[in-house]
Amino acid sequence: MDAVLLGVSFDFLTAWGFWIGVGVLAGIYGIFTLGLQLNVGFTGILNFGQAGFMAIGAYSAVILVVDVGIPFFLALPLSMLITVIVGLLIGLPAVRLRADYLAIATIAFSEVIRITVQNARGLTGGNQGTISLELDNGRFFNETWQDISRWMTDNLFDPIGLSGNEFLNLPLLVVVWGVLIILTFALARLVRSPWGRVLRAVREDEDAARALGKNAFFYKLQSLSIAALLGGIAGWFLVLAQGSVSQEAFEPIWTFIGYAILVLGGLASFPGVLFGSFIFWAIYEGLRAMELPLSSDKDAALRFVFVGLILILLMAFRPQGAMGKKEEMVLGE
Amino acid sequence: MAAVEASSLATHAQTKSAWERFKTWADAHAPLVFLAVMAVFAVFLIADYGINAFAQRSVNGIVTGSYLALGAIGLTLVYGILRLTNFAHGDMLTLGAYIALLFNVTIGVPFWVAILAAALLTAAFGVLTELTMWKPMRRKKAGTLQLVLMTIGLAFVIRNMIQIFAGAGQQRLDVNTTNTIDFIGLTIGSFQLIVVIIAFAVLTAVASMLKYTSLGRQMRALADNFDLAETTGIDTNRVVIYTWILSAGLAGLAGVLVVGSIGSLNPNTGFALLLPLFAAVVVGGIGNAYGALAGGLIIGLTQEWSTLPIPPQWKVAVSFIVLVAVLIFRPQGIFGSERTL
């Protein structure tokens, strides 16, 4: 039974592989956007450099495993440390700046990072920043992960009949969403803590928070570093999902896609990020899977027109998004 | 009481370290300090690579600086008057270039007619965005984030609609961009020379317009204080429309000149220029028209000079580092005064 409309097949909607793919991307960019939510929704700082932090996480983890030869599970915490340090280094000069300057400064930093991974062959070992995932002794960056993935398929999913090519990425989906949900709960708790209340005070009125003796600069710096960390974690999963890394995945448009997810789900709501990310990727990948009668570059362009329209229409007519709280929305001065 | 304060101030001034006194002096003479820093770099580069190589890169830098300045002035006008950080401005350049391409190559009219069409139609597009997006949003008292994300959305729509209609490939205008002029050992494309002349002529005209005409004075009044300007009876809607005509029209013109300078065009050309444009605006002082010219030239020169010691694929990163350095040490840009046109 083929569901066909205007010569476009909708069969993908019933394919497991399609939804697992959407789920993995939604999970990865959900983690990515949790950082933006903390910055924009709860601290009131416009971080436009999230894609750069994602690059730091992805490249540092791969370089540590492949070039330095550190075991996978030791490389991940080290990569977290590196991402946080980069977040601090960028935050130190940037968070003092006015909203729009901060946006420009962070996007400039992220582009410097991207241009570096694109051109520093000695560091990333590949043309245009494509990194080799293979080690000289035959080990792969994702070898450890593939062992885990195989174990999960054999012991958890095969017994209930979820195996085969379509379910290849099911283990990744489960792990990514596990991490995403844990992080969502942790962040939701964090912003309800005394620390989170100061963060919101900074967002509402920085001068007032300062008058109460709170070091607004330090809180903003912490917020940006946590966002960097979340971007970095999303970066690892992107490498595992794609099997390789290339600088194109860290262009500023991916930060803006994070913003589209953010405003879809709603500002100042962490569950909103999960919802926004799922809706976004279902539509985005759906547009790709529909195989419209267009050439591939025009098809890609159509998807980005959709991203642009989401941003324009939501900001014009429903700036609080699906789950955002209108009373908590501080959209700049 | 006042005497006590004055004397304590005086002792405070005396106890200032030499470094602090230098910082105060440098802050007051920022253009001079900038010039000095650039001169020091220039001396080192001349010493290392010879005067000829340096002069050639400087010529290239002035060409880049010219179109950057032309693009930056529209960005700075819209920011200064409307407080709108327009992330779609780079794509306005692309739009202008593709309009010129449509007239020049597809329809086949002469190049100068195509330039005119590009500037006029991009200006019309700017007015259209004002009427459909920015004016309603101002009335809703939208915040910075709302406006910035809308400009980003608009950027996506412009760039990708162009890609849908014109394809993603590289395209060329029907002008001779390979013809060069040699002069005392330096080479400049003859079209590049035209770019520099047009840019300087137009920028001088815009600066004079801002300084001497009634419209220019009204624009500056809006930049100083929008609400106060409205209260004093200035027809702000009219001034805003003219601001968009100027900003978008110059963006369209700049877009065509970019393609003329670098030879080819794709839908990402303008977006790739957005951050260098921001760099020019911030270096010159955001909202400052003369600053846009100086900032454009500084960014153009730094980018091209950097190709002497380091490979050219890094030159954009160099301009971003200049941008970040200025944001850190002198966020108001070289021409000090806060937010004036």
Image (spheres, rainbow, N blue to C red):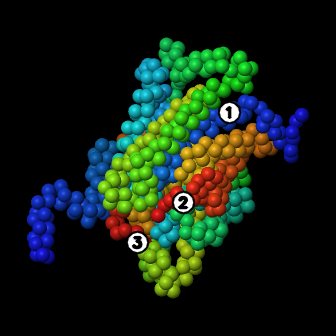
- Give amino acid for label 2: Glu
Q: First in sequence: mark 1 or mark 2?
A: 1
Distance from Cα at disc 1 to Cα at disc 2: 35 Å
Identify the element where label 3 is drawn.
loop
- Give amino acid for label 3: Thr
**Circle nearer the viewer, 3 or 2:** 2
Identify the element where label 1 is drawn.
helix
Q: On residue A21, which mark appears?
A: 1
Question: Residue A191, relative to residue B151: is it above or below?
Answer: above
- Give amino acid for label 1: Gly
Mark 1 neighbour class, 10 Å CA radius: few under 14, some 14 to 19, many 20 or more = many
Question: Viewed as shown, does residue B10 lie left or right of B87?
Answer: left
Q: Are marks 1 and 2 in contact (CB under 8 Å)?
A: no
Question: Viewed as shown, does residue B122 lie left or right of B334?
Answer: right
Q: Chain of mark 1?
A: A
Give percent across and percent down for residue A96: 36, 54
Q: On residue A327, which mark appears?
A: 2
Quadrant including the N terminus of chain B = bottom left
Q: Which residue is mark 3?
A: B340
Q: Chain of mark 3?
A: B
Mark 2 neighbour class, 10 Å CA radius: few under 14, some 14 to 19, many 20 or more = few
Mark 3 neighbour class, 10 Å CA radius: few under 14, some 14 to 19, many 20 or more = many
**Circle nearer the viewer, 1 or 2:** 2
Give percent across and percent down for residue B203: 47, 69
Q: Are marks 3 and 2 on the same chain?
A: no
**Circle nearer the viewer, 3 or 1:** 1
Q: Residue at x 51, y 69 (%)?
A: B82
